[in-house]
Image (cartoon, rainbow, N blue to C red):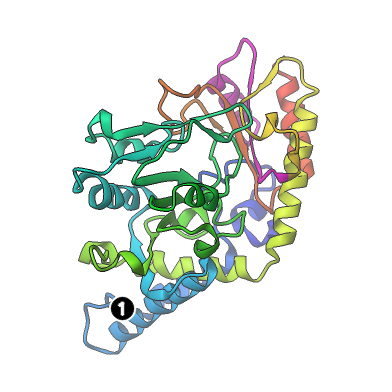
Amino acid sequence: MERHRYPVLRDRPELIYLDASNGFPLHEVIINSVSALASSLVGMPGKAQYGDGYQASAIVEQTRQKIAKYINADSSEVFFVSSATEAARLLAEEWCLRDTTATVAYSPEDHTATSRALANMAPDRLRLLAYNETGQYQNLAEASVYFVNHLHHLYGTDIVPSDIKERYPNSRLVVDASQSISRLEVDVKAMQADALYFSGHKLGAMGGSGVLFVAKAHHGRWKPTDFGGASLPLLAIASMGRAIDILASQSMFERDKYLAELTGYAISVLETVPGVVFSKGITQALDMCTGSGIVSFKLRGLSSTDVMLFLDEHNISVRGGDHCVSPEFADQDFVRISMQAYTTHDDIDRLVEVIRQMV
């Protein structure tokens, strides 16, 4: 992922963008293809009985097939939704709230999309999971539905979803792949996932669309529809197809290897700054070679918001203060840097140089 292929990074060389977990900058291929599509095609997919409408529908189906191949699913198992949050809500409603006997295991330290989706569940039907210091689930318990994060958006650690499925084979396993979809191999069969979801902007596409995978085995009782039957955002969906093309054209092994090395480097240089305290997760793990580009830390005596704003004054974009986790269960007062393959060692060196001005 060469930096010069991202116009906002190429044209603003002073910008150091370390918030990839929030959303990618758009690749020039996506910008050009969406612009060409918008200027050459009119009509909504599935809504128009003429040439442009049929072509729009064909683009949607081509994108569905690309996504299915990328996550090792059948295209009939892939549905388009507005976001990962919407996917979590749909799954919670159909598999948890409608089934009055369902018990649900999830961690309030995971993204609040899950907590909000399950807000109306009776407390005695919930099995709350916690993370240990190395960023792995602890106190696992039997439940009929499991909501898990493949890669944690604050702690930077990944789990093996199939381990939970093998331990509780009768549980329906729901995987949030929003952070892993562009960083790790996402294979629904290897995971033994019953459902999986992610937002398009997490893999480098435009915002406004996401993906929900539901295994065929569950279609007899419930089969989602694209956007609940509403009109489909063609440009956002088409951009996901192009984002998949970009990711698929690169070696996942090399991208994973680079991000692991960059994560270790970031931790090692941040450790040299007086007052830096790391969050739980990858920074506490013995093997930091498995990092996937997410590191969270704080500076003693300063709020994460203060650090974030100071960095912003120096054209460094990070996340601070609000990390979409339940504050009563997780400390949100961390600065998160989240990297991608376009991030360089020079970016990290500049980050540390500016942070040193604060201590």
Residue at the top extreme, as displayed: 301
Magenta stretch in the rendered image: 290-318
At a point 46% along the width and 29% down the height, the residue shown is: 322
The image shows residue 271 at horizontal and vertical percentages of 77, 25
At a point 43% along the width and 70% down the height, the residue shown is: 238
Secondary structure category for the residue under label 1: loop
Where the C terminus falls, by quadrant? top right
Q: Is residue 146 above or below residue 231?
A: above
> Relative to 338, is 51 on the left or the right?
left
> Relative to 235, is 50 on the left or the right?
left
The image shows residue 92 at horizontal and vertical percentages of 28, 47
Mark 1 neighbour density, 10 Å: few (under 14) some (14–19) many (20 or more): some
Whether residue 310 is in magenta: the answer is yes
Q: Quadrant of residue 198?
A: bottom left
According to the picture, the residue beneath numbered tag 1 turns out to be: 42
**Amino acid type, callout 1:** Val
